[in-house]
Structures are given as structure tokens and as C-alpha cells.
Amino acid sequence: MDFFRAQDAARGSTFLLVVLFALAVISLVVVTNLLLMLFLGLVDANQITTPAGAFSHYDWGHFLAIGAAVALVIAAGSIYKLKQLAKGGSAVAEALGGRIIAQDTLEPAHRRVLNVVEEMAIASGTTVPPVYLLEQESGINAFAAGLTPANAVIGLTKGAVEGLSREQLQGVIAHEFSHILNGDMRLNIRLAGVLHGILLIGLIGYHLLHSGGRGGSDSRGSSGFFVLGLGLMAVGYGGTFFSNLIKASVGRQREFLADATAVQFTRNPAGIAGALKRIGSANSGALLTHPDAPEMSHAYFAQGIRARLGRLSATHPRLEERIRRIQPGWNGRFAPAPTQVSATGWTTSDGATSSAKLSALTDSAGSIPNTDAARIAEQAVEQIGHPDETHLRYAQSLIGTLSPALHWAAREPYGARALVYALVLDRNTEVRRHQLVYLEEQADLGVYDYTLQLVTALRDTRREHHLPLLDLCMPALRQLSLIQYRTFNANLDALIRMDARINLFEWCLSRILLSGLAPDFGERRSHATIHKTCADLPRECALIFTLLTQVSANAPAGSRASFEAARAAVGIADLEPTRRNAIHHQALDAALKRLSRLKPRAKRTFLDACAAGVSADQQVSPAEFEVLRAVSAVIDCPMPPILLSGM
């Protein structure tokens, strides 16, 4: 799977869907026009027995007015729903009746789910998404929702949490992470929004039908509204029917891709295949009962609503077809799998061990020398959106060796804030003293004391644990109130700026953190022009290349060679390094915001150029890869950990 090609394919699908939905809207406008003009008496029904008759007797002034009104209703319904869903994955999960599973829960089944999600997130380089439980749903199903990897959530039904083994949950959650990484979530939300606008015509008809059915003094008018309502319902639901056909045809191919990615991620076909077999044998299957479940039917792990026209309107491939693609020798029986941890799988803090002894580049005090540097840098970009079993084993091993005090702190809002503050405290004694004085005055009650406790625990923590600890904090930090978030954001910014210089780890940490949290607290992304190539953003590219070369090279000659390697890879002939005094927090943040608007394949070119600059001096340091991972995360290209095993 190529991450950038998958992102491009998602954008291509979006364009196609816009065209097809536009055709559906035009059809609705024409048919609704005819219905309303008949109802209002603007056209004689006896004169429109043929299409030619209809067009010759149309009052085109009224036609345009009614058409504009219908289009406005559809547009308003779609915009309203899209604005609702723009809040991120949490809005989708809550609309389906989900409640967030607290990170500090001690419920064994919930703890198991959260541990699997943590492993998958660290292995794929994404922030840890919150997990929502659909408590009223006994069917076995799941979904991923959000606009970007940074604001994604995972949703699981009660049936999935209680009815699947850890191995099967791992397969299901790996499948959902594929949707997070491939750009499917944004497409799913756009589909739901546009479809709601078309459905609105039918809902108006429903209300007219019921108001007409109540009768009243004017029975003729009442019956007219009844007929109009019935007609609008037929038109609206007819439009929804055709929209569902489009949605179904797009969704089925994406499910096959996500299944294949889950197998690649876990190297355990029995996990996802076992989950599909459990669905086939369960009484409730994968069905959801919530009234709003049909709106997001295309986003579920398995067919969540009844397909009224069988395969024609099914949003997912048949279970049998999916299982046979994963296990060609399957015997065709949906025998329930034993609900226990697989002997061939790994576990972490919820009950199993890992024999993996993999190390990450960030665990090394030095650099990777000679020819290995270029290969590792190149593989780092290739593995974006493409984690595999070695990354998963590494994540499980890392989580298993975390300090319990730090891991527990990351699971609740007070501890998460304290842990982030502790991570950015300066090594310089004098600067740290000023930072602590500031925190004592400005931090929320209890957070300062908690920070002091965690400073001691962090002392013996390996460097490779710092960014994963940040990822683990994200779900807890999303539970802050708006006031708490603003205080936290201001305090973090003050702590980072207190030494009056750019500390690259602090900058990396703050970018990853705030790019993930900002959408949850009302800071919407710009909808500026999408840039097709890196040549559209030469100054931004030069700024990031200069930053990377200053990290990578000690001598001016080495710095220039690194910049030239990046410039050549991006293909901008007259690019020059940025002046040192122009490299500051605000400039870097503004550059990354614009670079995040590159098209997917242009992002690949940009990150390839960054990797070329990093490896040009034939050595790669931990600091360089921390910056590379931060840049990747902010432009929505999550990079898995850089592993040394087998290099």
C-alpha cells in the first residue's frame, strides 16, 4: 500500500462523488419541480402525459424559482451536517450514542481495547485516538471517524468489546487504522454530509404527510398537503436510494484494501478473519440499531444496516468473500472463535509478554553512520502510512517497559498536563528554576505538584519513550474544558519560549501536540488553495530544509551539502537557504500550515527531499528524525518509529 497514492485516490473518489451527487441533485430538482407545480396548479396534469408535453407547458420562471429553493434546501442540509461533523470523529461517535472510554478505566475488557489502540497508534506514528463505546449495540462492529489522523476516534460496539478475543480486536482495530491512514475518514464524512442534504427533501415530505393527515377545517387543503408530503417523501428517499448505490460501490473496494492492510500490519490473518467469522455466527451479526446508524453505514467495519436490495445497496463485501481473500483455504463455517488471547499473538500490560527486542533510532545517543543513513532515511518516508508487524512488536515492547507512574499519568487529564510540562522542562538549571516558578503561579490547581513528582520519574526514562508518552497523553488532554485547554496551551508556550531559543525537541513536541488538539477546541484548519507542487511553496521548503541541515551538519560545508541534496530532490533550481535569524517558532508554524495544503504526492516529494537532506552527510542523528517525524505529523503524514533492528 502506498500512503500517498491512497490519499490521492481518496481525493479522486471525492471528485467523482461530487459529480455523481450533483447529477442526483439535478434529478431531484427536476422531479420536485414537477411535483410542486402540479400541486400549486401551475401545470395541468392532463397536458404532461409525455415528456415533450411537460417541457412545452412548463412555466420556466416558476421552474427556476422552485429549482433554486430545492437546491437551497439540499445545500443547507448538507452544509449543516458537514458543519456538525467538522468537529471531528467525536461528533460522529456521539451522534451514534457512543460514550468515551476513560483512559484510566480498570474495567478489564475496556482496558484491553485501550491497550490495543495504544499499540497501534505508537506503531503507526499517529497520536492515540479516543475510543468510544456504543453501549446499546450488541452487534459486532467498529468504525474510525475524523477529518485527519490527528482528530480521529475509534468506535466499538458493546458486542465487539465483549465478543472478540484480543487477537480479533487487534485485527479489527488494525483495519480501522487503515481507514485513518488512507484518507477514507474524510471521504466518509463528506458522503454523510451530502447525503443528509438529499435526505432532507424526504424529511420535509414526512412532516407534511403527518400534518396533512391530521385533517382540519379545510379537508381539501389537508389532503393536498398529504399528497404533496407523500410525493416529496418518494422523491427524497428515491434520491437517497441512488446516493446509497454510489456510496455502496465506493465502499466495498476500500474494505478489501483495509483488510489487506490489517493483515500486513499484524502479520496475523487469523485475527481479522476470526472477527469476521464471529460476526457470521453472532445472533445480531454486525447490525446497529441506533436511528442514525444508516447515515454512517459506509464507515463501519462490517455491514451495519440491512441492505434492502441485497448486494446492489450493500456498503460492504459479503463476509464470505472477505474471509476467503484473507484465508483462501477457509472451510466456509462461521464457527465462533475461542475468546482468549492467541498463543501466537503478543500482549502488553493486559496480560501477555513480548519477546521483541527492537530499538528505535531515538534510543541511540549517537548517529547512524555511512551508507545505512541514506537507506534508513529513505525507508522512513516509505513507511509513512505503511507500518508493519515489526513496528507493532516494537510498540508493544515499549509500552511494556514504560514506567507505571508515567503511563498512569498519561491516562488522565491532570497527569497528562503535568507530564507534558515535565517533558519540556529545560536541562539548564537556571532556566528550569524560572519555568517551575512560572508553573507554580500559572498552572491549574494540583498540576504543579504532580509535575514535580513526574520530573523524578522522567529522569531515568529513555529518550525513545518521550514522544510515545506524548502520544499516550492525547486522549486525556482532549477531555480538558476549553478554559483548561487555553491555560494549558498558554503555559506550554511560555515554558518553551522561556530560554529564548529554539529547542528542537520542545518545538517538535509542541507541534505534534497542538496540531492534534487544536481541532477539538474550535481551531479549524484553513481551507486555502491546495498546492499542486512544492514549487508553489519555495520559501516554506527552504525554511524547513535549512532547519534540518542545521540539525544534521556541524560544519558549514556539510550544511550546504545537505541543503543542496534536499533542493535537488525537490527539483527547485533557484532555492536558497533561509537566513538563521529568520528561523523562529512563528515562521516554522506558518510554513508547515501552508505545506499541509500540498497535494499528497507533492507531500511525498517534499518528505523525500527532507530525507535526502538529513542523510547527505552520511549520518543520521536522533534529533534529525525527531524533527522529520514532527514535520510529517503536522502535514498529516504520520511516520512510524524509525527502527534499527535488521538495518
Image (tube, grey):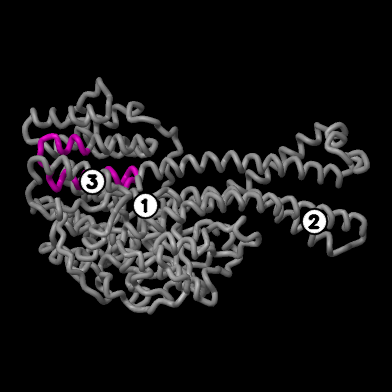
Q: Give the vertical position of 581 relative to 521 (above or below).
A: above
> Left or right of 24: which side holds 468?
left
Query: Which residue occupies the foreground of this view, 542 or 186?
Result: 186
Disc 3 is placed on an element classified as: helix
Mark 2 or mark 3: whose residue is earlier in sequence = 2
Q: Residues within 10 Å of mark 2 (few under 14, many from 20)?
A: many
Percent of width and height locating residue 223? 88, 57
Percent of width and height locating residue 533? 36, 30
Q: Is-magenta flag for residue 620?
A: yes
Alpha carbon distance from label 1 to label 3? 19 Å
Mark 1 or mark 3: whose residue is earlier in sequence = 1
Going by the numbered disc 2, the residue's amino acid type is Leu
Mark 1 or mark 2: whose residue is earlier in sequence = 1
Residue at (53%, 53%) from the top-left corner? Answer: 84
Going by the numbered disc 1, the residue's amino acid type is Ala
Say whether marks 1 and 3 touch (CB < 8 Å): no
**Which mark is drawn over residue 150?**
1
Q: Is residue 172 visible?
A: no
Disc 2 is placed on an element classified as: helix
**Which mark is drawn over residue 380?**
3
**Which mark is drawn over residue 230?**
2
Which residues, given as a range, are shown in magenta?
A: 611-637
> Left or right of 192: which side holds 503?
left
> Left or right of 133: which side holds 314?
right
Alpha carbon distance from label 1 to label 2? 44 Å
